Image (spheres, coloured by chain):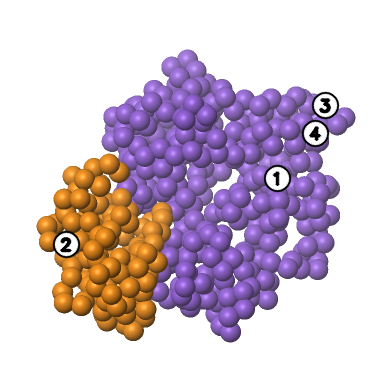
Amino acid sequence: MENEFMKTCLYDSHLALGAKMSPFAGFMMPIQYSSIRDEHLAVRNHVGMFDVSHMGEILISGSDAEAFTDHIFTNEVKGAGAGKILYGMMLYPDGGVVDDLLVYCGFVPDVFLLVVNAANIGKDYEWIKKQAGSYNVIIDNQSDKWGQIAVQGPDSEKIVTEVLGLDRAVSTVFYTYFETECDGTGIIVSRTGYTGEDGFEIYASVEKTVSIWNELLKAGVTPCGLGCRDTLRFEAGLPLYGDELSAQISPVMAGLGMFCKLDKEEFIGKDALKEQKASGVSKKLVGIELEDKAVPRATYPVETEDGRQVGVVTTGYHSISLDKSICFALVESGYSVLGTKLNVRIRKKVFSGTVVKKRFYRTNYKK
Amino acid sequence: MSKVIDGLLYSESHEWVKVDGDIAVIGVTDFAQKEMGDITYVDMPEPDDEVSKGEDFGALESVKASSDLYSPVSGTVVENNEALADAPELINKDAFANWIIKVKMEDMSEVSDLMDSKAYSDFIEKQ
């Protein structure tokens, strides 16, 4: 059964740690080691680490790499500078999202590393190749060569400097990275993450990833599964492709227009986004806070006070850090204003709620 | 090992029943609370709501999942355990001490196809 799924380089370690494993994006991944709650709180209060080796890495190089990356990407790499990281999306011409991703601007000219969602690696790679046309670029899917560990939480800087000896981490600000040699192999260390806390993501060869993981384990860093990765990113207001962004949910609908540079000369999907901004979108992503402790979950209907369905929950939890039941929901635009009263139907009952800001938890990034 | 208590009756969906005259006191088993992990919410019916044997009457919510509760008997809810509204974690602390609802049974013969403690112990062994 498990043979049908891919394994990351840390698979054996997860089993040895007694993780509860489950398929995710074609990989057998750890959902939790101890409990989602304990792991979530470890990241919020101290430090935790995630195996995110399933994420995809696609390298774009060649003399047109900059122009081509800006052609397929909503944010702008031109002028960003070496060592910068940009968040944005790749779009279809109609403004639907192919994927959301990070672009690492290379320390040598004309090199960009795209870090994409595991579930979309194959689709993204095909999409990127298809757009290349007459651009002089080399598109290299390096996903199998890289392992990746995310070290997240307020103690992350202390851990990566003291345990891993990565002293340059101290002067590395949010959304930048450095490359270094570690026992003779090149690694990438970026101040990024998907939890709303300070933290680092470390990319290394699969062998090196295993040794870094073991060093961090020995130092007492809490291993954390995908269960709390979702509760953490959700509280921090961060979207998950497939839930809050998709071919049907554009960045304008998701409230992520700030990552789409409409003043850029061109990019795929730009005209559609401009049109959506000018004439408005039919649906918008909102945050809803419920008065009760009942848990709103994906697909549950969102209704007006008189019982008309105007939307659907995309992600919801009883928030661990805030002790409140909250959700993201995609609703008709007329109901997206902060303070609007909206109800969520949970099984047979209806629970009252209010539209609130999507960033439920105050993030603690080191800018 | 999950705790099982003698003198109670058990369903295959891991509810326990204590029969007290024509009243069925219903909760979930220790096995069920362990499977769920940290319970964050208990969705309970209100007094005077009707419940039917084999149909869902509410749910337990944990961080990741929700799990329906199935009524082992048919009848009318006479009381729900209000303490669980504020402290759902009581079920994790002691699933047998913290009942969820009390139901006035329509047909007391319905409890005859529930398991006794020995049969339930064997049942969860195989899970």
CA distance for labels 4 and 2: 65 Å
Provide residue A297's location: percent of width, then percent of height: 49, 61
Do circles 1 and 2 both sit on a common chain?
no
Q: Nearer the viewer, mark 3 or mark 4?
A: 4
Q: Nearer the viewer, mark 3 or mark 2?
A: 2
Q: Nearer the viewer, residue A148 or B41?
A: B41
Q: Is residue A342 among the parts visible in the rendering?
A: yes
Per the rendering, the colour in which chain A appears is: purple
Disc 4 residue type (three-letter):
Lys
Query: From the image, which quarter does the C terminus of chain B lie in?
Result: top left
Mark number, residue A136: 3
Q: Nearer the viewer, residue A240 or A294?
A: A294
Mark 1 surroundings: few (<14), some (14-19) or many (≥20) residues within 10 A: many
Provide residue A246's location: percent of width, then percent of height: 67, 51
Check disc 4 and report the residue beneath it. A130
CA distance for labels 1 and 2: 55 Å
Mark number, residue B8: 2
The chain identifier of the residue carrying mark 4 reads A
Q: Secondary structure beneath disc 4?
A: helix
Disc 1 residue type (three-letter):
Val
Contact flag, marks 1 and 4 (Cβ < 8 Å): no
Provide residue A295's location: percent of width, then percent of height: 43, 65
Q: Residue furthest left?
A: B6
